[in-house]
Amino acid sequence: MHFINMNSAARNAIVGGILCHFCYGTLYCWGTSTIYTTSYLRQFDHSIDTHKTLGVYGLALGGQAFTMALGGYLEKNITSRYTSILAILGLTISSFVTSLCKSISGLFFAQLLFGLALGVGYLPPMINGYKHLPTRRGFVSGAIVGGFGAGSFVFNFVILGIVNPTNKQPEQTGVNKGFYTDPSILDRVPTMWRILGCCYVLIGLTGASLQANYKQIVGASRSASAEESASLLSMAEDGEPSPTLPPNPQSPKSPQAITGKSSREMFKDPIAFVLMLCLFCTAVGGMYMATTFKSYGEEQVRSDCERAL
């Protein structure tokens, strides 16, 4: 009910953030797409295998970490909307470049670009949501990051439906064991990446456009308040009774209400290092499984659709 009753600007900020993160969630789809992409590249270089393409995922994550601070800086200077647009365009370019790749080096470059763009766009939707709902940070973070997980879930099946709609199995014997050699599957791999790029444009730019400029909203609210005060003053001067207006709990609050530690203060706090260690210990194993589960599952689960699930 809180989501329904909040003002339209805050609601749009949440929905826009969810849509952007829905696109960003395709980062976790590498476990599904890697076997198809690797099989496609083996047409041009037979030495390429999943051990080499596994590094692509790590490179994308490194790129994300490298530019997350830049995303916060851009959000502060050009607003969340335009920062998200830059990130979505970066993801789109990355997908189209990937569709043209015929070497492992080209794939590494394209997916590094994906990670850099993802890092720029990850935080701004949440920061924007915090400005609209400074007392509901948990709700904002949970809703928007939920879009990230939903995107990875949905796009797994989008990838499967594009590349392998008939649920064909990879080769079971020979030098190509564990890889696909069927031309009908391999020829769809570039198309898959281009369709993902188009989805980024359609969904991501819609989400970015919903993230209103918070400063403009505050300015409009203050202008309205000034006009209201002038109207009440005019009524008082004319001898008319001034109506008592109830407070509006959904009116935009000042950005100064949002406080937090600076980077320098954070590194002086031992709790920050505990959180970093916890994240490292929990994330490394999970990230590794996210990229290798499908290759491992080929020997355990025969259905490609079930492996995607």
Image (cartoon, rainbow, N blue to C red):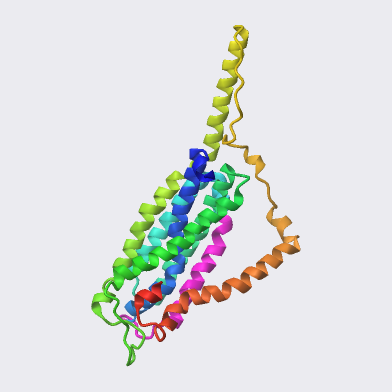
* Residue for point 30% across, 71% down: 163
Magenta segment main secondary structure: helix
Magenta stretch: includes residue 69: yes
Q: Quadrant of residue 103?
A: bottom left
**Left or right, residue 301 beside residue 283:** left
Against 173, residue 71 (above or below) is above
Magenta segment: 43-70
Residue at the outermost front position: 1
What x and y, as percent, mark residue 262? 69, 53
Q: Position of residue 216 (x, y in %)?
A: 52, 35
Q: Is residue 237 above or below residue 118?
A: above
Percent of width and height locating residue 199:
35, 57
Residue 164 appears in which quarter of the rendering? bottom left
Question: How far across and how far down the image is residue 106, in percent?
Answer: 39, 72
Q: Is residue 169 above or below residue 260?
A: below
Q: Is 5 or 58 nearer to us in this picture?
A: 5
Q: Residue furthest left?
A: 184
Residue pushed farthest bottom? Answer: 174
> Which residue is drawn at the image coordinates 60% and 27% (left, top)?
246
Residue at image x 50%, y 71%? Answer: 59
Tag count in the figure?
A: 0
What residue is rendered at 26% in x and 73% in y?
Answer: 187
Residue 113 seen anywhere in this rendered image of the structure: no
Q: Quadrant of the C terminus?
A: bottom left
Q: Nearer the viewer, residue 141 or 100?
A: 141
